[in-house]
């Protein structure tokens, strides 16, 4: 049951969201137990492979170039660094690595070729590979799938109505198109929202309704609590109450019984008890590691302590789907052949020059000609 037919309208979903809290949690916990192992929680690591300098104006994001947030921008990481970080994440119990780049959209350039290689490498380590790189074309999604990408994250953030209050440099439809391209390529979709941006409850329900209308709702729905960062337009937003995130997690759980609901950004301000209620209400994943792209996140050891106390166990990779195969990338292979051909041609030209005893003409500077003339006088 991908979507719960009992709650497929705005009215029924809103009624569900507003249920007495403990009844809502109980209903969510019951559904969760029917479709998932309630003790298993996936630990995912989020790695910022390219930080800051983004041309977009998402009001919550410290990586937008136009806001003064003190984020240190850096270029795309090397494949070697990504492998190192992925190894650490795996050793610390993560079964998924999500690589995030602060791009508006993916461009068909060398950076994207490098991301393709990163996907191939991390997939070969037995981790679920997820990317969040901005907007994607159909062909780019296919290349990522071919490289072994398991999931692609592209959040809708909020309702269509509220979206324009937070972001002006792209439209809701742009997001929907990318999700369609990801789905079309056969990649698992990860898409969710942020609460606490000043939106109304109606907007939270509107976000869920956007997924409800999809032929195939996302396999993975992250629920983030806004981390208000100084320098962003949303810096003044008040932290949400803990029961709001519990409500949102529970409502999402009940509405999309098969999806993995991910308790994502904003966990540093949630007590272990609140997080415990979120797991009870159906959250099946957290991000591990002390940073979530650029914002703080609980340390690995804090989370493993929480897992011990709550009796949770880290979920193994590929429990919800097979590991994709990594295939060679045609574009990269063509570029390699071309580079090899150029190298060979250059070598042949050099060999020929040596064979013909070619002596390059020496170009004299004007000064040295003048000197020679003076000496010969
Ligand atoms: S959320 Fe993504 S697209 Fe928006 S400003 Fe940040 S990095 Fe850019």
Image: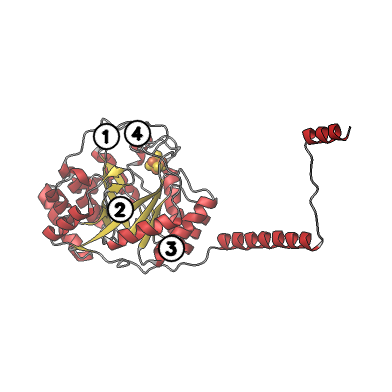
Whole-number angstrom distance, CA of label 1 to CA of label 3: 40 Å
Residue 140 place in picture, x, y as percent: 50, 55
The answer for how far apart the CA atoms under marks 2 and 1 are is: 20 Å
Picture disc at residue 221: 2
Q: Are marks 3 and 4 in contact (CB under 8 Å)?
A: no
Residue under label 1: 198
| Residue at horizontal 35 percent and vertical 62 percent from the top | 128
Q: Residue at 19% of width from left, 55% of height from top?
A: 301
List the residue tagged with mark 3: 121
What numbered label is drawn on residue 69? 4
- Quadrant containing ligand 1: top left
| Picture coordinates of residue 120, whole percent (x, y) | 45, 63
Give the left or right position of residue 106, taking residue 189 as reference.
right
Closer to the eye: label 4 or 1: 4
**Residue in the image at 49% along x and 67% along y:** 327
N-terminal of the pair, mark 2 or mark 1, is: 1
Disc 4 on helix, strand or loop?
Answer: loop
Dot 2: what SS? strand
Give the alpha-carbon distance from disc 4 to disc 2, as whole Å.
28 Å
Residue 241 sits in quarter: top left
1 and 3 marks in contact (CB < 8 Å) = no
Q: Say left or right for 194 vs 169.
A: left
Tell me the element at label 1: loop
Name the residue nearer the viewer: 348 or 283: 348
Cα separation, mark 4 vs mark 1, equals 20 Å
Please state if 85 lies on the left or on the right of 6 as rendered: right
């Amino acid at each position: 049951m991908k979507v719960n037919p009992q709650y497929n309208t705005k009215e029924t979903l809103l009624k569900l969201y507003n249920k007495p809290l403990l009844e809502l949690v109980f209903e969510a916990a019951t559904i969760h137990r029917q479709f998932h192992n309630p003790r298993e929680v996936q630990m995912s690591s989020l790695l910022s492979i390219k930080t800051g300098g983004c041309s977009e104006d998402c009001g919550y994001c410290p990586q937008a170039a136009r806001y003064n947030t003190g984020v240190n921008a850096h270029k795309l990481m090397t494949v070697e660094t990504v492998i190192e970080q992925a190894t650490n994440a795996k050793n610390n119990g993560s079964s998924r690595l999500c690589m995030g780049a602060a791009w508006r959209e993916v461009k068909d350039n060398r950076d994207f070729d490098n991301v393709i290689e990163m996907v191939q490498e991390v997939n070969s380590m037995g981790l679920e590979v997820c990317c969040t790189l901005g907007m994607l074309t159909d062909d780019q999604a296919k290349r990522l799938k071919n490289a072994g990408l398991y999931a692609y994250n592209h959040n809708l953030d909020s309702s269509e109505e509220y979206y324009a209050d937070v972001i002006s440099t792209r439209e809701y439809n742009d997001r929907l198109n990318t999700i369609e391209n990801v789905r079309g390529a056969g990649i698992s979709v990860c898409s969710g929202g942020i609460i606490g941006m000043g939106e109304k409850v109606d907007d939270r329900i509107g976000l869920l309704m956007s997924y409800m209308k999809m032929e195939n709702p996302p396999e993975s729905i992250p629920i983030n609590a806004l981390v208000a960062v100084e320098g962003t337009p949303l810096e003044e937003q008040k932290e949400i109450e803990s029961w709001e995130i519990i409500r949102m997690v529970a409502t999402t759980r009940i509405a999309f019984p098969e999806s993995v609901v991910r308790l994502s950004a904003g966990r540093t301000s949630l007590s272990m008890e609140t997080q415990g209620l979120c797991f009870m209400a159906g959250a099946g994943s957290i991000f591990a590691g002390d940073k979530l792209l650029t914002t703080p996140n609980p340390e690995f050891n804090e989370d493993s302590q929480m897992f011990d106390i709550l009796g949770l166990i880290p979920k193994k990779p590929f429990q919800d789907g097979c590991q994709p195969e990594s295939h060679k990338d045609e574009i990269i292979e063509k570029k390699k052949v071309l580079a090899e051909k150029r190298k060979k041609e250059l070598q042949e030209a050099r060999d020929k020059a040596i064979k013909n005893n070619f002596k390059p003409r020496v170009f004299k500077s004007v000064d040295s000609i003048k000197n020679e003339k003076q000496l010969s006088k």
